[in-house]
Amino acid sequence: MRRTGTTRRGAFTATGAIAMGAVLAGCGDGSGPREGSAGTDAATADAQALAARTERTLRASSARTSRELLARYEHVVRAYPATVARLSPLRDAVRAHAEALAPDGKESLVFSRTRATDAAAAVKELAVAERRTADAHTATLLTASPELARLLASIAAAGAAHAYLLNELAKETSS
């Protein structure tokens, strides 16, 4: 009986061929612009300026998203004082995320009203907001620089964990 499917030897051969192709594709004949030429220096400066503007824009947008989430936390804590003890650690983490994204943090919080009629529903709304914020940070990863992408990935992972914890807290919370 003949074996079908991918064998270990075939997988290693394919991986080696792909790696060799990537190495060879990266090699050039040296006919491109030489280092130190004026055209290359100007293009590099333009590319760096564009990258810096893009990163500032991405950071500002992500910080705004985190500040909106922080404002939701503040509103729930003020509306339902019984939730303060359990929400404070999560709220403090969201505040730290916003500060990490925009250290100057000159924008003020814009408070939003909750449609929740009790503490459990308000906490569930926070869980949805955390998930939405984590998804927004994850979507931003595609266009971010490596350093910013690592920060956003960490914040998104924390947001996903917060969403889980908030869903569990909503089950335990009574009005």
Image: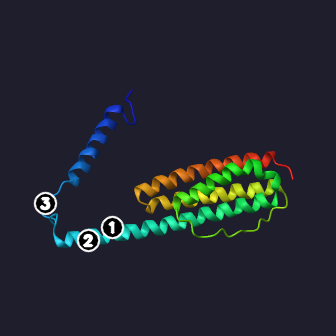
Q: In this view, does 119 lie above or below 6?
A: below
Q: Is mark 2 on a helix, strand or loop?
A: helix
Q: Which amino acid does label 3 sit on?
A: Gly
Q: Which of 19 and 123 is in front in this view?
A: 123
Separation of residues labelled 1 and 2 (CA atoms): 9 Å
Q: Is residue 104 above or below residue 172?
A: below
Could you say which quadrant of the image residue 9 lies in?
top left
Circle 2 residue = 43
Q: Are marks 1 and 2 in contact (CB under 8 Å)?
A: no
**Spot occupied by residue 16 in the image (x, y as percentages of width and height):** 27, 40
Q: Residue at x 64, y 56 (%)?
A: 131
Q: Is mark 1 on a helix, strand or loop?
A: helix
**Spot occupied by residue 113 in the image (x, y as percentages of width and height):** 76, 68
Q: Which of marks 3 and 2 is in front?
A: 2
Separation of residues labelled 1 and 3 (CA atoms): 23 Å
Q: What residue type is labelled 2?
A: Ala
**Spot occupied by residue 160 in the image (x, y as percentages of width and height):** 61, 50
Q: What element carries label 3?
A: loop
* Residue 87 located left or right of residue 175: left
Q: Which badge, 3 or 2, comes first in the chain's sequence?
A: 3
Q: Which residue is drawn at 54% across and 63% down?
A: 62
Circle 3 residue = 30
Circle 1 residue = 48
The quarter of the image holding the N terminus is top left
Q: Which amino acid does label 1 sit on?
A: Gln
* Residue 83 located left or right of residue 24: right
